[in-house]
Amino acid sequence: ISPRYSFSQEELDNYQPTIYTRDDWGACEPLPDIDRIEYDRMDKLSYLVLHHTGQIKGIGTNPPVWTIQDSQMNSGKHSDIAYTTVFAKDGQIYEGRPWNVMGSALCPSKESKADKRRNGNLINGNTSLNYGVLNFCLIGDFTFEQPTDRQVKSLLFYIKLKMPEFSNISCRNIFGHKDYNMIAERRGLPPTR
């Protein structure tokens, strides 16, 4: 976390953001997806990648979470919201794609799609940058602005709350979206962008 953010331990301990489930925020049902991959065990999750929404055409930098889902599903690239969790500027937390469903925020590889279609499941998870990755997204365009204090507090709160469930995710396995090539390198995959 940037030195710009300095919170006391007491401030963080007393911070209690609102967490909205998919039902709470009115998430659409996922579209049928022949490439959908579900994990049978949570210990297969080993990375956390942080994203930002950037600019969404016609909406700007502070879209409601259902608009993010709608935009991604209507793009034809996603069967659901791409992110596991979304953090609004006011600090509210929205649960997105279920934890047991592989995300789609990073580039899917041709190899992983072919593996899934050929075998009915992803046999070699190392062929996909999305495999074993939780994708958290902060609303905003951080090429022009910084995350709000509430977003950062909510992110820290949620990581503290949820990470004990994901013992394979260590601090060295937390990346920003543009660092995805580090995952590719660890898996022996070529860069895809």
Image (cartoon, helix red, strand yellow):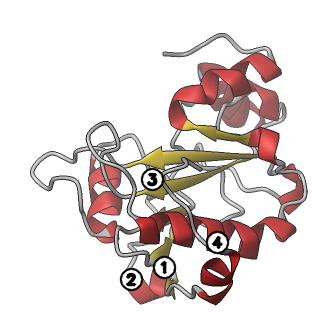
Residue 160, compared with residue 60, is above or below; it is: below
Label pair 4/1, CB-CB below 8 angstroms: no
Picture residue at 22% right of the left edge, 54% below the top: 61
Picture residue at 82% right of the left edge, 51% below the top: 169
* Residue 6: quarter of image: bottom right
* Residue, disc 4: 158
Number of dots carrying numbers: 4
Q: Earlier in the sequence, mark 3 or mark 1?
A: 1
Q: CA distance from mark 2 to mark 1?
A: 5 Å
Q: Which mark is residue 79?
A: 3
Q: Amino acid at mark 1?
A: Arg
Image position of 188 (left or right of 193): right
Give the x, y percent position of residue 172: 80, 39
- Look at the image and tell me whether residue 92 can be seen: yes
Q: Amino acid at mark 2?
A: Trp
* Residue 184: quarter of image: top right
Label pair 2/4, CB-CB below 8 angstroms: no
* Residue, disc 2: 25
What secondary structure is found at the residue carrying circle 2?
Answer: helix
Q: CA distance from mark 3 to mark 2?
A: 18 Å
Give the x, y percent position of residue 54: 30, 44
What secondary structure is found at the residue carrying circle 1?
Answer: helix
Q: CA distance from mark 4 to mark 3?
A: 25 Å
* Residue, disc 1: 22
Picture residue at 23% right of the left edge, 44% below the top: 55
What secondary structure is found at the residue carrying circle 3?
Answer: loop
